[in-house]
C-alpha cells in the first residue's frame, strides 16, 4: 500500500472506487464528541442516568443510553437504608394512607415528609425535608445532631413560612417523631389532615424515599468536609439544586420550573374562562347532554385530586 499505484490497483481488483479506500466511519467520532458532553453533564449531575442526560442535552434517550453503555458511563448508586428498631414494636395509629386513595393534581394539596441520617466524623447528622408531592419541590427542611418531634416540626414550620399556606393533607411514616402529639396537634389545629404509611411500608412514601436515596448518592462523600459548617453549606446548596435546577425525569424539568409552568397555565385558564364567561354559562341543550366535569369559572378553586 506504500506505493502510489497500489491503491488504484487494489480498488480495481475489488471493483470499488479508489476514494472508498479512504472512507472513515463518522459514527465513532460523533460518539466520542457526545461522550465528552455526557461526561460534562454527569460531572455536574453525578446520578443522571440516560433519561435525564438525554433531557439535559436535548437528544434521544436511546442514543444517550447507547453511548453511555459503549463507554461504560454509569450513574452513582444508592446504598441501603438502616432499620429503625425503636419504632418496630409500636402499635400503628388509625390514620388513613391518603396516597393510596388519591393523586394530587395541584401544588400544596399533599405534603410528604421524612428524615434521614448522615454519618459524619464518627457522629450522626440528621436531615428532614418536607416536599410537595405534586411538584416534587423541597419546601422546608431542618438539619440537626438530634432527631425528635421538635426537629420535624421546625421543617414543617419553615415550609409554611416559605409558601404562606398549609396543605390539605400531610403524609409521613409512623415514626415516633411524626406520631407525637407535638406534631399532630400543631397540624390538626390548623386544619391539616394527617396521612400515615402502614407500618413497615416505606414504598407508600415513595417520593421521599426516592429523594433521600438519590440525594445521598449525588452528594458524594460526606467526610470530604473539614468542618461542620462546610458540610451544612454544601447540604443547603444541594437542597436548592434538587428543587431549582435538577431535572426530575417524569416532569422533564426541575420541580420549581414545573410549579411555574403549572401556575402560568392556571392563569391562562382563568383568563380564558373570564373572556368566555357568557358562552360557558349557557345551559346544555337537554338534561342528558352534560359535561362529565364542571367547567372552571373565574374565582373557583382548582381541582386538586383524582380519587381512585
Image (spheres, rainbow, N blue to C red):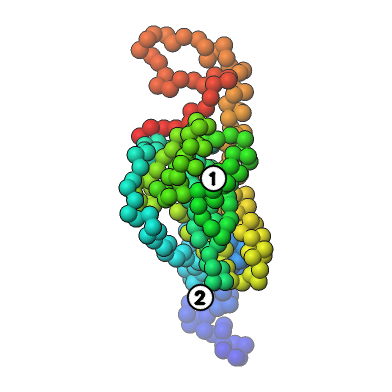
Compare residues 182 and 266 and report the one nearer the observer: 182
Checking the image for residue 153, the label placed there is 1
Compare residues 176 and 249 and report the one nearer the observer: 176
Side of 173 relative to 238 (left or right) = left
Callout 2: helix, strand or loop?
loop
> Looking at the picture, does residue 26 appear above or below residue 113?
below
Crowding at dot 2, Cα within 10 Å, few <14 / some 14-19 / many 20+, comes out as few
- The residue that appears at 46% across and 64% down in the rendered structure is 78
Callout 1: helix, strand or loop?
helix
**Label 2 belongs to which residue?**
16
Percent of width and height locating residue 268: 61, 28
Task: Name the quarter where the N terminus is drawn.
Answer: bottom right
- The residue that appears at 43% across and 45% down in the rendered structure is 179
Crowding at dot 1, Cα within 10 Å, few <14 / some 14-19 / many 20+, comes out as many
> Looking at the picture, does residue 31 appear above or below residue 278?
below
Q: What residue occupies the far front of the structure in this picture?
A: 181
Mark 1 vs mark 2: in front: 1
Task: Name the quarter where the C terminus is drawn.
Answer: top left
Side of 19 relative to 81 (left or right) = right
- The residue that appears at 57% across and 71% down in the rendered structure is 121
- The residue that appears at 62% across and 23% down in the rendered structure is 271
Amino acid at each position: 500500500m506504500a506505493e502510489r499505484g497500489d491503491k488504484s490497483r487494489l480498488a480495481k481488483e475489488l471493483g470499488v472506487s479508489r476514494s472508498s479506500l479512504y472512507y472513515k466511519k463518522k459514527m465513532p467520532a460523533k460518539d466520542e464528541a457526545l461522550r465528552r458532553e455526557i461526561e460534562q453533564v454527569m460531572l455536574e449531575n453525578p446520578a443522571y442516568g440516560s433519561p435525564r442526560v438525554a433531557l439535559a442535552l436535548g437528544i434521544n434517550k436511546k442514543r444517550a443510553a447507547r453511548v453511555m453503555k459503549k463507554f461504560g458511563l454509569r450513574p452513582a448508586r444508592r446504598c441501603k437504608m438502616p432499620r429503625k428498631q425503636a419504632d418496630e414494636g409500636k402499635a400503628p395509629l388509625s390514620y388513613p394512607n391518603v396516597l393510596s386513595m388519591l393523586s394530587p393534581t395541584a401544588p400544596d394539596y399533599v405534603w410528604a415528609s421524612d428524615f434521614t441520617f448522615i454519618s459524619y466524623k464518627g457522629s450522626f447528622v440528621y436531615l428532614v425535608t418536607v416536599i410537595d408531592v405534586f411538584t416534587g419541590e423541597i419546601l422546608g427542611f431542618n438539619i440537626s445532631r438530634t432527631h425528635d418531634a421538635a426537629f420535624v416540626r421546625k421543617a414543617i414550620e419553615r415550609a409554611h413560612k416559605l409558601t404562606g399556606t398549609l396543605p390539605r393533607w400531610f403524609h409521613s411514616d409512623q415514626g415516633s417523631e411524626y406520631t407525637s402529639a407535638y406534631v399532630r396537634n400543631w397540624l390538626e389545629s390548623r386544619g391539616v389532615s394527617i396521612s400515615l404509611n402502614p407500618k413497615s411500608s416505606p414504598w407508600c412514601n415513595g417520593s421521599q424515599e426516592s429523594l433521600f436515596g438519590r440525594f445521598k448518592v449525588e452528594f458524594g462523600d460526606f467526610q470530604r468536609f473539614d468542618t461542620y459548617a462546610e458540610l451544612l453549606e454544601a447540604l443547603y446548596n444541594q437542597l436548592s439544586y434538587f428543587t431549582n435546577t435538577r431535572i426530575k425525569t417524569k416532569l422533564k424539568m426541575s420541580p420549581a420550573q414545573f410549579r411555574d409552568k403549572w401556575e402560568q397555565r392556571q392563569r391562562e385558564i382563568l383568563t380564558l374562562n373570564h373572556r368566555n364567561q357568557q358562552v360557558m354559562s349557557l345551559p346544555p341543550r337537554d338534561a342528558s347532554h352534560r359535561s362529565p366535569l364542571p367547567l372552571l369559572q373565574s374565582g373557583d378553586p382548582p381541582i386538586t385530586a383524582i380519587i381512585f
